[in-house]
């Protein structure tokens, strides 16, 4: 397909790295009508722009094709696996161990839409109805795990499940998790310990006013800022939680690919 490139298009080296994760069936299977790379570029365009599926530009494959393939990828955990390997490459490149032993956890509330309203809750602190996204990143800001819940649920209620996801992503290597004061409580610490993680709450000094940079805590805030550059993640636009989580890992892969471009070029060469 000959068309003008979009800013979301991936280059040849990046595609060669990604394609083994993406091919859930033979690349030249008889039922494959559109090039896999064009479908992937279309999905990345959706992640960056946050547009409706029907507004996908006509020089991409049809929206239905892209949406159905995206769901197959999300269900298979393709982008979670890709983000894991990219994270290992990034950590090793920065002379760290491949799997982290320390993570930082936090949450944010995404405004609901008609598509996601059936599973939304009201966040009294943020005065917003929507979905709460709980995530964990390593000390370099790389995404490890994502969970969702209605916004009315407390952060501490998700600690056990989030820590289990973290341990699965890290090969049961994580020992310590930093969190904000929303995770305070003996029961919360016990739940984290049940997953093999020591929970450390980083408290804000009582005498300070206004913005202050808290040790360790700023890492996850920076990761949230990186993710917010993808307009698909600006609100909860998805009918399924699986899709919302999938788009978070799509964004994580694109962020890591941008950082690792020279390395991927060498690997492809």
Image (cartoon, helix red, strand yellow):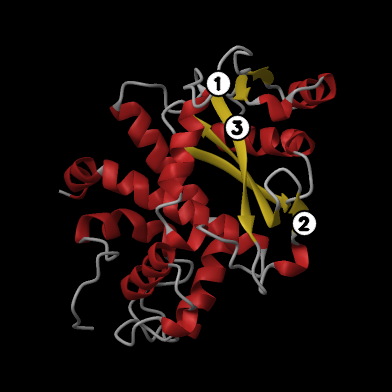
User: Which SS class for mark 1?
Assistant: loop
Towards the viewer: 194 or 109: 109
State whether residue 63 is above or below residue 142: below
Q: CA distance from mark 1 to mark 2?
A: 30 Å
- N-term mark: 2 or 3: 3
Using the image, tell me which numbered label, if any, was put on residue 121. 2
Q: Which class describes the residues within 10 Å of circle 3: few (<14), some (14-19), or many (20+)? A: many
Towards the viewer: 247 or 205: 205
Place of residue 61 in the rendered image (x, y in percent of width and height, measured from the top left):
37, 83
- Marks 1 and 2 in Cβ contact (< 8 Å): no
Q: Residue at x 49, y 22 (%)?
A: 212
Q: CA distance from mark 2 to mark 3?
A: 21 Å
State whether residue 188 is above or below residue 39: above
Q: Which residue is mark 3?
A: 105
Towards the viewer: 214 or 2: 214
User: Which SS class for mark 3?
Assistant: strand
Q: Nearer the viewer, mark 1 or mark 2?
A: 1
Quadrant (top left/top right/bottom left/bottom right) for the N terminus: bottom left
State whether residue 234 is above or below residue 173: below
Place of residue 166 in the rendered image (x, y in percent of width and height, measured from the top left):
61, 35
Q: CA distance from mark 3 to mark 1?
A: 23 Å
**Left or right position of 48 against 173:** left
Using the image, tell me which numbered label, if any, was put on residue 209. 1
Q: Residue at x 37, y 73 (%)?
A: 42
State whether residue 139 is above or below residue 135: above
- Marks 3 and 1 in Cβ contact (< 8 Å): no
Q: Residue at x 47, y 85 (%)?
A: 54
Place of residue 153 in the rendered image (x, y in percent of width and height, measured from the top left):
79, 45
Q: Residue at x 43, y 63 (%)?
A: 47
- N-term mark: 3 or 1: 3
């Amino acid at each position: 397909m000959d068309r003008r490139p979009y800013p979301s298009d991936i280059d040849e080296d990046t595609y060669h790295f990604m394609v083994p994760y993406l091919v859930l069936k033979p690349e030249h299977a008889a039922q494959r009508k559109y090039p896999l790379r064009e479908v992937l570029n279309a999905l990345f365009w959706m992640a960056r722009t946050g547009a409706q599926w029907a507004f996908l530009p006509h020089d991409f494959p049809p929206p239905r094709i892209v949406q159905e393939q995206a769901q197959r990828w999300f269900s298979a955990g393709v982008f979670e696996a890709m983000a894991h390997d990219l994270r290992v490459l990034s950590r090793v490149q920065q002379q760290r161990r491949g799997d982290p032993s320390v993570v930082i956890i936090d949450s944010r509330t995404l405004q609901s839409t008609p598509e996601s309203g059936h599973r939304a809750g009201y966040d009294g602190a943020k005065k917003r109805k929507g979905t709460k996204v709980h995530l964990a990143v390593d000390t370099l800001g790389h995404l490890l795990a994502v969970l969702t819940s209605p916004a009315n649920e407390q952060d501490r209620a998700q600690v056990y499940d989030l820590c289990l996801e973290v341990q699965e992503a890290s090969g049961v290597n994580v020992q310590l998790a930093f969190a904000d004061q929303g995770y305070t409580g003996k029961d919360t610490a016990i739940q984290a310990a049940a997953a093999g993680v020591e929970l450390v709450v980083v408290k804000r000094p009582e005498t300070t006013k206004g913005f202050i940079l808290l040790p360790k805590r700023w890492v996850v805030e920076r990761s949230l800022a990186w993710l917010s550059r993808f307009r698909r993640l600006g609100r909860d636009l998805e009918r399924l939680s699986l899709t919302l989580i999938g788009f978070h890992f799509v964004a994580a892969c694109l962020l890591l690919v941008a950082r690792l471009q020279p390395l991927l070029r060498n690997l492809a060469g």
